[in-house]
């Protein structure tokens, strides 16, 4: 695995993560619960009469109502993104799955989105590089192997057991298949059958399957992992331990190429807002936790329970860096597992505006790992 020369501040307490990263193959996979967009009725920041005018009167921003999208949750809740947009109005839209957000971006009803690496890769490849660019990172980590301690005490004990992943070909599924391969064990990637039985199970169903005993463990994102722990499971492995710098991308910020071309000033303002949001989150972990949980409560009707949010927190990193080298590695793992053909990812990143914002803020620039747009 290549070294990942990136940096991100560890969030020391307070956020939880919820992400089921989408498919790298075929159809895009769900990243949340359901597939429909959710209307965002949060109050919008007041705009001063003399607010700066940008090239677009509004910008439509998509995100998921989970804490791996903390940049969006906190940035919207605290008005930190709106503040940078002046007279340009934010039209936020919460999505419960990757496919619907990509569909909205492709259909022209969404301009910018927070989304996982797998749908970003899949959509970029399927459109032959014509529909989106990754313009920033947002979050890293938040994936754990949780097991029934009565059945599994060591990693070698996984052989012969039933272990859940969210979906065939999704980011956690690919990572687990790669881990199995490196152990020297064999599993058919299509059926999931082999030395370990990989049981593709929706994250909503996984806790019940775990309690019933139909699965012996799961390689899953937060907060599902912490839910399993609250039901008696034990964390046997945190995926961050498998990465050289203990960082791997779980949430990107993407943009419609058309919107980027026509409204670069608006995109730059949004990125200024996200960079300031991430800085505020890392500097104010307790306030950020409350802010994100308040936004989640507004979206879903209730906040996350402390027994879920608190243990989930330490595995999440908030970062401007897209950790591009790790996206490349994740794609290589999917090819190795024979779940996808070798994708051409050249041009998937356009980090020029992000690096401009970072430089202006006195922060180090970030790398596109050689996958940057040349146009």
Image (cartoon, rainbow, N blue to C red):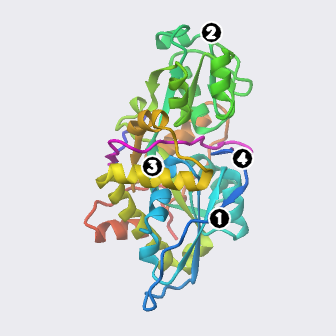
Q: Which residue does the image show at 45% across and 49% down from the upper left?
A: 139
Asked whether, in this view, residue 210 is left or right of residue 364, the answer is right
What span is in magenta? Answer: 7-29
Camera-side mark, 1 or 2 = 2
| Lower position in the chain sequence, tag 2 or tag 4 | 4
Q: Is residue 21 magenta?
A: yes
Q: In what element is the residue under mark 1? A: loop
Of labels 1 and 4, the one closer to you: 4
Going 52% across and 23% down the picture, which residue do you hit?
A: 146
**Helix, strand, or loop for circle 2?**
loop
Cβ–Cβ under 8 Å for marks 2 and 3: no
Label 1 with label 3: CB-CB less than 8 Å: no
Mark on residue 262? none
Q: Which residue is mark 3?
A: 139
Q: Tell me which residue sits at (48%, 74%) in the image.
A: 45
Which residue in the protein does label 1 denote? Answer: 131
316, 73: nearer the viewer: 73
Mark-to-mark CA distance, 2 and 3: 33 Å
Q: Is 319 located above or below residue 241 in the figure?
A: below
Please name the residue that numbered disc 2 is placed on. Answer: 160
Residues under labels 1 and 2: Cα distance?
43 Å
Residue 201 located within the stretch drawn in magenta: no
Query: In the picture shown, does residue 93 fall above or below 158?
Result: below
Q: Is residue 174 left or right of residue 135?
A: right
Q: Residue lying furthest front in this view?
A: 302
Residue 34's mark? 4
Q: CA distance from mark 1 to mark 3?
A: 22 Å
Residue 291 point in image, percent of width and height = 44, 55
Residue 252 image offset from top left, x and y in percent: 51, 54
């Amino acid at each position: 695995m290549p070294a990942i020369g990136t940096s991100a501040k560890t969030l020391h307490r307070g956020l939880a993560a919820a992400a089921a990263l989408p498919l790298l193959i075929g159809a895009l996979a769900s990243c949340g619960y359901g597939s429909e967009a959710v209307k965002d009725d949060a109050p919008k920041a007041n705009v001063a009469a003399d607010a700066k005018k940008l090239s677009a009167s509004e910008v439509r921003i998509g995100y998921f109502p989970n804490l791996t999208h903390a940049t969006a949750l906190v940035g919207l809740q605290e008005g930190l993104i709106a503040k940078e947009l002046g007279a340009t109005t934010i039209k936020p839209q919460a999505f419960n799955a990757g496919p619907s957000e990509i569909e909205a971006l492709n259909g022209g009803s969404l301009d910018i989105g927070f989304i996982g690496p797998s749908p970003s890769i899949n959509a970029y490849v399927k459109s032959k590089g014509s529909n989106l660019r990754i313009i920033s990172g947002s979050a890293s980590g938040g994936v754990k192997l949780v097991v029934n301690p009565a059945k599994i005490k060591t990693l070698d004990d996984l052989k012969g057991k039933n272990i859940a992943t969210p979906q065939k070909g999704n980011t956690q599924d690919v990572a687990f298949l790669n881990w199995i391969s490196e152990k020297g064990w064999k599993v058919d990637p299509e059926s999931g059958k082999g030395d370990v039985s990989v049981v593709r199970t929706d994250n909503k169903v996984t806790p019940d399957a775990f309690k019933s005993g139909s699965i012996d463990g799961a390689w899953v994102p937060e907060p599902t992992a912490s839910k399993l722990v609250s039901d008696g499971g034990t964390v046997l492995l945190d995926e961050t331990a498998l990465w050289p710098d203990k960082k791997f991308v779980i949430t990107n910020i993407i943009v419609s190429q058309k919107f980027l071309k026509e409204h670069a000033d608006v995109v730059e303002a949004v990125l200024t807002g996200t960079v300031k949001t991430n800085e505020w989150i890392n500097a104010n972990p307790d306030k950020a936790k409350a802010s994100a949980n308040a936004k989640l409560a507004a979206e879903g009707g209730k906040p996350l329970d402390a027994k879920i949010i608190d243990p989930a927190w330490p595995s999440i990193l908030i970062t401007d860096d897209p950790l591009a080298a790790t996206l490349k590695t994740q794609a290589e793992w999917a090819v190795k597992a024979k779940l996808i053909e070798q994708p051409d990812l050249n041009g998937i990143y356009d980090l020029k505006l992000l690096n401009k914002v970072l430089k202006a803020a006195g922060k180090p620039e970030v790398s596109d790992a050689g996958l940057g747009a040349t146009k």
